[in-house]
Image: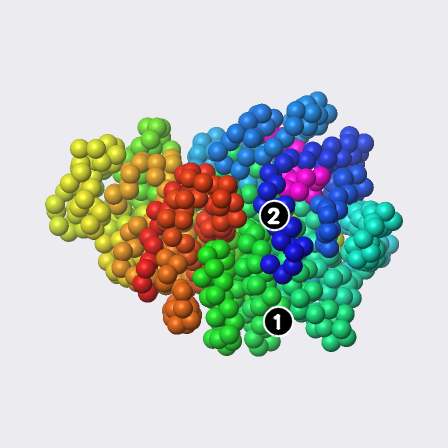
Amino acid sequence: MSSKRIESFKKSYIDSKPSISIQRAIAFTGSHKNTEGESVILRRAKAFKEVCANIPVTIFADELIVGAIGEFRKSGIICPEYSWKWVDSEMDSFASRSQDPYRIDDLAKQTLRTEVFPYWKGKSLEETFLSRINAETGKILIDTGIIDNDSKWRSAVGEITADYQDIIFQKGFGGLRKEALAYLQTLEPTTAEGLEKIDFYKAAILVSEGIIALAQRYADKAGQLAQTETDAERKAELLEIARVCRKVPEHPPESFHEAIQAVWFTQLGSILSENSLALNLGRFDQYMYPYYAADKECGATNPEKAQELIEALWIKLSEWVWAISSNTAKFFAGYNSFQNLTVGGRMRDGRDGTNEISYMCLKATENVKTHQPGLSVRIHPDSPDEFLMAVCKLVSAGTGFPAIHNDRVGSEMLLAAGLSPEDARDWSNCGCVVPHFRKVGEWTSAVSINLAAAIEYALNDGKSNITGEAMGLNEKPAAEFKTFEEVKTAFYRQLAYLIKHSVIGSITAQQIHAEMVPRPYLSLLVDGCMEKGKDLSKGGAKYNLGPVLTGIGVADSANSLAVIKKLVFEEGKYTIDEISKALAADWKGYEELRLAALACPKYGNDDDYVDTIAVEISEFYHKEIRSYKDYFGSPFNSAFMGISNYIPAGSVIGATPDGRKAKSPLTEGVSPHAGTDLTSPTAAMRSVAKINHDVHSGGTLLNIKFAPELLKTERNLKNLAAIIRAYFALGAFHVQFNVISTEVLRKAQAEPEDYKDLLVRVAGYSTQFVNLSREAQDAIIERTTYEAF
């Protein structure tokens, strides 16, 4: 690590247990009790300001970047306005649950149950959504693992990229307050539009005052600590912290230290406003480099000091714990908040933007080995070889970082979505693998759709093989399918049905969000809202893109259809009825048939027999989704990205024709199914590249696992760099690597205390291996480990 200080921070971070702070919930609720009858956006703005005025102000030992979500080193917060019921029903078992446990003391639980939850009964986003969703949709949407969007009605949206370049670093929140006041003075409450705008600008003023007040409280705290500090060096640091917090984020930063502190205060405000995932930091190297270069030139900083500040920020980002329900935790396992930060890539004018900060970010991730931020890199033909080699070196460190993206394809995705060429070139990664832009409003992870369910329902008259319950459309008995085309048609009918209800769930949630949970603070961070006087939840952003519907199990579906095509309709070795019965029996008594299924061509081996089917599925999926428009009239967008959703999605699906057994995990993103890509990593990449990535603007994800010995030498790293460039030349969008031995993972399972900082790539993100459930750990271990290119 860059310093003893950072080493100490890292130890405190690793040794701390995630704990629930209720201070935000108390302040937010107290404010709402005093604002009954006022407009919703003003109530939320006043509540945010109340939170900023009342949450604990904590400066941990030796900190340089200050600001905490709660009183604990690793704090999670509760937002009862979104959902309180899951907290009430689960918090007695928070500490013992298998995925993402939290600590919460008895007094905190009593306070929530007596002072907070009673107020929100009947008023939460969750309760409203559940009361409005139609029964047919709810049957397959609510906690089923078939289609899942509970992160959009049990919690906030998140999924924004704060605009540091054009808003925060140019104006500061003091400037934003003045701008809102100027707009407000031009308005009269003589029209419905005027009334809405007046409330919007009043709310903008309130939240600006709130985050400024919070920073001032930290300035006061640092000053107080300085008065009693006996160490001269630390006393000087505390006085400097006080000065910086008096300056930012109220005013634009003028130094590297001020800029980093402004970034964290902005992020802190976002978390306190709605505790949501994918609050992205955007193109960090682009907006931070001018401050670094200026400070370095005048002698105010040097590479060592700047590196320490960056690593301090990495740890602050990792201290926030996203508090979520046990169901949501299955889909987003590992305490991950998906704060994505992007480096490299082209600038707005098309020139390469790699700079010294790009390298420092790679080094920070390797040094501190925290799970946040989610580090992404953009690679294009003119990316310096030195930069790509630095990326490959970080890959070889075995952290699962960085996510590596094809710069050109990311731009093409956003061009197709309607962005200008300059804006499309300026993209950054959102959450997992979604190309995004700081002036965009979009639900980048709206619904996860279980493609394997469509296979199951097509072959089982719309019924679940696990429960026997009717979940899909009625279908004729499998034995009556006479051609492979009939089987495919049935599969696509069932898939279209799942997509339709995903759209219904999304539009219903969008409507309720616009009514109940405006986003006055986040609206200041996204261009367009201030100019329009319109909240982000109502389409205020410069660009409004349709929600992303994520497909789970494209490999499983393609492999299953390939088995049916080959064994039943081409070779005639088995009947479709035999396959259907084998699936119902989870292959018991049908072992010979299962071996035949396993031997059929599998996606991920550069075999057009099955790869062509995967491409066809992806094209159907995209076109069907694009046929729908969202609450604001924007077309929906498709994706094959991955979080940990492929594990719970698999747990509700019976055996599939590809030889997979019931309840076992599906496949994440566009990756091959674990253990079936037996040829080579380049064959897997060639299979994946056949999919038309540029149309899936929600992102596509490929995970590959290497044995550590494969990347030990400089030559090995050069080979990896060449493979990445070749893969992107084929038109693929993304790849990421787990470089770790199965032996180490097994040891970490057996001795978790000795491997507390072992990072692994789960899907579109990395997290500590020991923070995953046994089921999630096993799924990672089962992936094919390549020992040669």
Between residue 749 and residue 706, name the one nearer to us: 749
SS type, badge 2: helix
Between residue 264 and residue 650, name the one nearer to us: 264
Between residue 668 and residue 629, name the one nearer to us: 668
Judging by the rendered image, the residue that carries numbered circle 1 is: 356
Q: Residue at x 31, y 45 (%)?
A: 491
SS type, badge 1: helix
In the image, what residue type sits under mark 1?
Answer: Glu
Q: Quadrant of residue 24?
A: top right
Mark in the foreground, 2 or 1: 2
Judging by the rendered image, the residue that carries numbered circle 2 is: 11
Classify residue 692 as left or right of residue 61.
left
Q: CA distance from mark 2 to mark 1?
A: 27 Å
Q: What are the residue bounds of the magenta stretch?
A: 69-87
What secondary structure is the stretch in magenta mostly built from? loop
Q: Residue at x 13, y 50 (%)?
A: 571
- Dot 1: within a 10 Å radius of its alpha carbon, few (fewer than 14), some, or many (20 or more) residues? few
Residue 205 is a magenta residue: no
